[in-house]
């Protein structure tokens, strides 16, 4: 039979879980940015992967696109929403980890 986790173990497990989610989503944002810059050859697998990135990251970044419209530099558009998204994600992660730490 499984023994219940002591509170300290549960808290550290929760912090590791939240941190892992933070880093995975941060990585997805960076890969989304890179794949939007680089024109990849068509492949069904690459297309599915890009669609997964779009479906996962774009709804989050569109929240910040409403606040900060794209910047036009000559004929080039610059989307600054990933910067705001990463800053907001980092702030939320720190707040959540600090909140979980308060339970100790």
Image (tube, grey):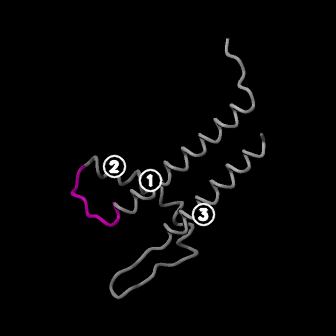
Q: Marks 3 and 2: which is nearer the front? A: 3
Q: Name the residue under label 3.
A: 88
Q: Which of marks 2 and 1 is nearer the N terminus?
A: 1
Name the residue at 49% across, 66% down: 82
Q: Which of marks 1 and 3 is nearer the N terminus?
A: 1
Callout 2–callout 1 Cβ contact below 8 Å: no
Name the residue at 52% across, 66% down: 62
Q: How many labels does the image show?
A: 3
Height in image: 95 above or below 74? above
Between 83 and 68, the residue placed more toward the observer is 83
Q: Which of marks 3 and 2 is nearer the N terminus?
A: 2
Q: Name the residue under label 2.
A: 48
In the picture, residue 1 is in which quadrant? top right
View extreme (right): residue: 103
Residue 86 x/y as whole percent: 53, 62
Residue 90 x/y as whole percent: 59, 58
Relative horizontal placement of residue 34, taking residue 55 as reference (left or right)? left
Callout 3–callout 2 Cβ contact below 8 Å: no
Residue 78's disc is none
Q: Give the range drawn in magenta.
A: 35-43
Residue 74 x/y as whole percent: 35, 88
User: Rounded to the nearest whole Å, what is the CA distance between mark 1 and mark 3?
Assistant: 15 Å
Disc 3 is placed on an element classified as: helix
Disc 2 is placed on an element classified as: helix
User: Rounded to the nearest whole Å, what is the CA distance between mark 2 and mark 1?
Assistant: 14 Å
Q: Name the residue under label 1.
A: 28
Badge 1 crowding class, 10 Å Cα cut-off, few under 14, some 14 to 19, many 20 or more, is some
């Amino acid at each position: 039979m499984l023994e219940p986790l002591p509170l300290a173990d549960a808290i550290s497990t929760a912090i590791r879980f939240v941190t892992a989610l933070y880093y995975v989503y941060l990585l997805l944002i960076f890969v989304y940015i890179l794949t939007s810059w680089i024109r990849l050859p068509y492949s069904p697998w690459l297309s599915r992967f890009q669609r997964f990135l779009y479906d996962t990251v774009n709804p989050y970044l569109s929240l910040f696109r409403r606040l900060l419209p794209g910047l036009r530099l000559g004929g080039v558009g610059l989307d600054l929403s990933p910067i705001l998204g990463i800053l907001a994600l980092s702030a939320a992660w720190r707040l959540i980890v600090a909140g979980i730490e308060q339970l100790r």
